[in-house]
Amino acid sequence: MKDICVLLTVTGIALAPMTVDTQAPQTHRFVPTVFYTTYSFAHPAALRIRPGDRVVTKTIDAAGVDWDSKNVSSGGNPETGPFYVEGAEPGDMLTVTFEKIETNRATGYSSSLLAPYTIDPAAINSRIDREPKRMIWNIDKIKGIVSLDSPDITPSHLEVPIKPMLGCVGVAPARKEAITATTPGAFGGNMDYAGLNAGVTVMLPVNEPGALLFIGDGHARMGEGEAVGTGVETSMDVEFTVGLVKKRAVGWPRLENADHIMVLGSARPLIEAFQHATTEMHRWLMADYGFSERGASTFMGQALEYEIANVVDPNFTVVAKVRKALIRANRP
Amino acid sequence: MKDICVLLTVTGIALAPMTVDTQAPQTHRFVPTVFYTTYSFAHPAALRIRPGDRVVTKTIDAAGVDWDSKNVSSGGNPETGPFYVEGAEPGDMLTVTFEKIETNRATGYSSSLLAPYTIDPAAINSRIDREPKRMIWNIDKIKGIVSLDSPDITPSHLEVPIKPMLGCVGVAPARKEAITATTPGAFGGNMDYAGLNAGVTVMLPVNEPGALLFIGDGHARMGEGEAVGTGVETSMDVEFTVGLVKKRAVGWPRLENADHIMVLGSARPLIEAFQHATTEMHRWLMADYGFSERGASTFMGQALEYEIANVVDPNFTVVAKVRKALIRANRP
Amino acid sequence: MKDICVLLTVTGIALAPMTVDTQAPQTHRFVPTVFYTTYSFAHPAALRIRPGDRVVTKTIDAAGVDWDSKNVSSGGNPETGPFYVEGAEPGDMLTVTFEKIETNRATGYSSSLLAPYTIDPAAINSRIDREPKRMIWNIDKIKGIVSLDSPDITPSHLEVPIKPMLGCVGVAPARKEAITATTPGAFGGNMDYAGLNAGVTVMLPVNEPGALLFIGDGHARMGEGEAVGTGVETSMDVEFTVGLVKKRAVGWPRLENADHIMVLGSARPLIEAFQHATTEMHRWLMADYGFSERGASTFMGQALEYEIANVVDPNFTVVAKVRKALIRANRP
Amino acid sequence: MKDICVLLTVTGIALAPMTVDTQAPQTHRFVPTVFYTTYSFAHPAALRIRPGDRVVTKTIDAAGVDWDSKNVSSGGNPETGPFYVEGAEPGDMLTVTFEKIETNRATGYSSSLLAPYTIDPAAINSRIDREPKRMIWNIDKIKGIVSLDSPDITPSHLEVPIKPMLGCVGVAPARKEAITATTPGAFGGNMDYAGLNAGVTVMLPVNEPGALLFIGDGHARMGEGEAVGTGVETSMDVEFTVGLVKKRAVGWPRLENADHIMVLGSARPLIEAFQHATTEMHRWLMADYGFSERGASTFMGQALEYEIANVVDPNFTVVAKVRKALIRANRP
């Protein structure tokens, strides 16, 4: 038996009584064959796991194409899962620590037009080239780059560093809603955050028994904001370990990596995504790090960082971040 | 005579015929005594300078207090300047390279409440502590930190690294508008970008003869988004060199530092700030770096980075960024 | 057999081949006992009806209280239905003509605080009276007013004219989503439009076989915008007749009454609700009234009217309206 | 000497000690020859008038063309004025009652494309017809219609009722700003409200000595929202009477006509315009009509009406309205 929740050791701050499991953690190998395009309580569990267990699995790309380039699902971010976490009940917090998020085929695709709402309406009206095309990128894990050759564009060769991520990590939504896999929200979902890489722990609210964890929508690379509406969409090998914190309210998805704690707010308009992320960070600093209401505000005013994850999904996503070194330097 | 425009040598990409000045660049020492709280064509030039000239000057804090802690102006970001740049005409681009932005007194102040529009309205309704207080920070340039001691908050001691910046760099606006020094726009102004530090070149449109450059609103430190409505507000020693690119349209302020080229869009709502920045970056990549319309889009989709500069001023500011290393790797 | 679709006779403009039913229309009396708080394809049909049929039914209030003041459901706009319309298939348009929307008990309730997002954040911060209270209104159908007596407010007596409406009219959403009954969208739902009174025909897209029509959330009266987050919430007697137009795309709910044709766009931010409504009206004028692309724009520019239905639900709703007299005067 | 402020007699509610002028009101006939395209304290008074005085004057169209079809100014809503009101000081409220707003030539012009931000971005991308054209309308005051004949559109003949209005009524802005005549704000300006017709009283804050009243931008007709970016732009004969209420704060322009009191909030995004209007109406009901904080909220929730004035100017404008009959029925 071991400390099952990785995030505790990262910040070194005791969070709460954790689920202690008398059974040794297991590693599950799960190759999905059925995929879902809604986050919903209504889907049957694909696999039942326990807090502390590790899952070794795969995701297909946003259009339903797998690691063998076979089209195995209709599109719209078909999800692997749902994983039923034993003991998870509404009001708990699920933690998902990603040990591995790695591309597993040689190509990915992207769009080639800046998406609606990313550019000025007048720029849409005046552009010459209006039909979106699907661009095919080569994924070179050895060199660590994704690259593209196309006679339709200048430059005809493009290349950028690889940085594998998952666009989608979510649980069954609250209030028995079933939400398309293209949408992010308080339940996680299609947040499309370029920083959701291996090494990250994602913390999500539990709305339904078993939480029902879904993952999908891998990108070999994605620019911040996802301004063309896609990353370099591809299939992935994924390994993650789940944990559970009982009776811990979490308003919006929280992330932790080596350097930062983060909150991902999702909404339209963009400012509301910002507001959700900032409000939840304020609550988090008060609840877990000992800040008073005004202390948290004063600190945040000079310490916050932000990222814009996406402005193309049905809800936009903003990330509020605080450097863990600053929290350590400002421990009450 | 020398290459007067620093940015040219940074990217190593020839931009345009530059103003060549037969007179040797001069260094001007200018200690301001009159300050303006609007950006306007109507203010008389404080100093006339030539492209290539360097200015060694000072700014007072946002409330009008100077380096000797004397209140020398009413508040609202009182500006140093305007500097009249000889030869600058509407349609040109002014460049301002900051060699030095450094605090010059021992204290700064901040607010202590998360500002309107930064948190959920429901969080405003439920907060207990609603009256803003002015917090005084100590500025320690040797240790490189700003710190605060207050019995009103927990923790009662706060400290964060120093990172001096100017909130305001602007020129006289277009269309004979006079705009308060608290507002950012296409003319620059109160963009409140935490990345506007020494080492940055700012590129601004010229709307009036002489451009009329204003600077002010120094912060020893500011969290991204400026969520409490202030940084650590203080006075500054500033050194900058101006350049001029003739007949070069620039829709929104552009920045360049060692690592990035950037565009700062300012508007409400936040998404329009994002749109302005993204649209201008698209134009910039096409105009100066050889990308085609679709090539720029496809590249940006996987290369863009964003920062949220402020969400508290009359217009909000979003920064679209592209890493210069990626531009060099994707030269047509 | 008769012309089953009321809207055709109102504008006098032939729309499309209609479903002709060889069976005489029926009137169904349906008293609901089960209520749903999501719009979803997954709920079993409460009643199967045919195009041309009339339904005489009832709705309970938003909190689940019925015409006998009994609490018969949990809250969140519990819906009557779903009504399965025989022959309705995805791609068709369902029409629902309301002959009667009438209060059926003596009281309703409202909130007493202006809701988040309806007032300036600074006004939220400075208000003295922050706890919402439930206010009970008397409904006097004879006098035609709703009135309130409360010692907690000045004036202690309030009265406004009765104007019964349904907040919710919706069908099963597209893409197998299940959406809470508090949310409006392209499928209709909780649009909270004060103009959805007896005499109105609502036109909705069919996303699932049978369409699955839900109604609920009656208000004896509601101010535009629903600024306190409620109308005068109460139970209703409702009578409606359904019709079906085969293979007719409808992007957003359309309404028609004696004077206007209307489109209800729902989204956040508010401008997107406006955009959806305006765009769909443009399409409608081109598809059904003979306008060219530019002709519709030019006409709309001088003819449009708008209402703000709600700014308090998960999506806000804006109504774009054109007077039918103007359409008749501008027939190609 | 007479009661100089028309609004007092309309609602029958005593507002405040009014300026009583010992001199008889005068009627000034003023034909403008100089026009301004900014609202600014810096423009010299065109005419000095006293509270109670009437002005008989003219406005030219938005492009600078007058009643004789002569181009007498550059465009951007060139304004008649400024009128300096004797005795007006910062903190006072200026009232402007329009007795006449009437077209004075045979034609007006409009745009022909739905403007940016009025339609979905995807609809912009897919439209075939993208170049704006200037459409010329005939103004027939006898028949009471404006009409258009154009072979470029279907229908080739359009006609709608005449409804003359002023797009611009404003004073010199606060804080020494100079703001383009295309922009609305707290100072009034280019609100583009189709309900600003003869019979309306406009109430504006006084920011500068003499208030400095500007008027302009007449429309023979305008659809709500001004979705094509123009009304039917034309020149006007205007008659108005000014009044002054000393030491009366007004946050946003207030209007009163025979049926309604109204507040016009202007901002981007649209929701902030809504928030400003609603917040100011709340204050107004408390300050002048005897409502308590919660009483005003409860009443407004069931009594408010809204209009969307424009979504095309640099700030958008929303009108919050309350029927005067409802105020009279709910007098404390």
Image (spheres, coloured by chain):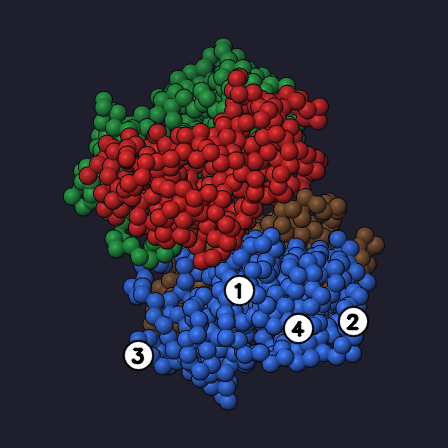
Chain colours: A blue, B brown, C red, D green
* Real-space Cα separation, disc 3 to disc 4, in angstroms: 49 Å
Kind of residue at disc 1: Asn
Say which quadrant the C terminus of chain C sits in. Answer: top left
Q: Which residue corresponds to mark 3?
A: A151
Q: Which residue is mark 2?
A: A20
* Residue marked by disc 1: A190
Q: Nearer the viewer, mark 3 or mark 1?
A: 1
Give the amino acid at mark 3: Pro
**Contact? badges 1 and 2 (CB < 8 Å):** no
Which of discs 1 and 2 lies nearer the camera? The answer is 2
Foreground residue among A241 and D287 = A241
Question: Hey, what amino acid is under mark 2?
Answer: Val
Q: Chain of mark 4?
A: A
In percent of width and height, residue C57 lies at 49, 34
Q: Position of residue B179 (x, y in %)?
A: 50, 48
Location of residue B57 with respect to C324 vertically, above or below: below
Q: Earlier in the sequence, mark 3 or mark 4?
A: 4
For mark 4, give the secondary structure: strand
**Quarter of the image containing the N terminus of chain C?**
top left
Q: Name the residue tied to disc 4.
A: A49
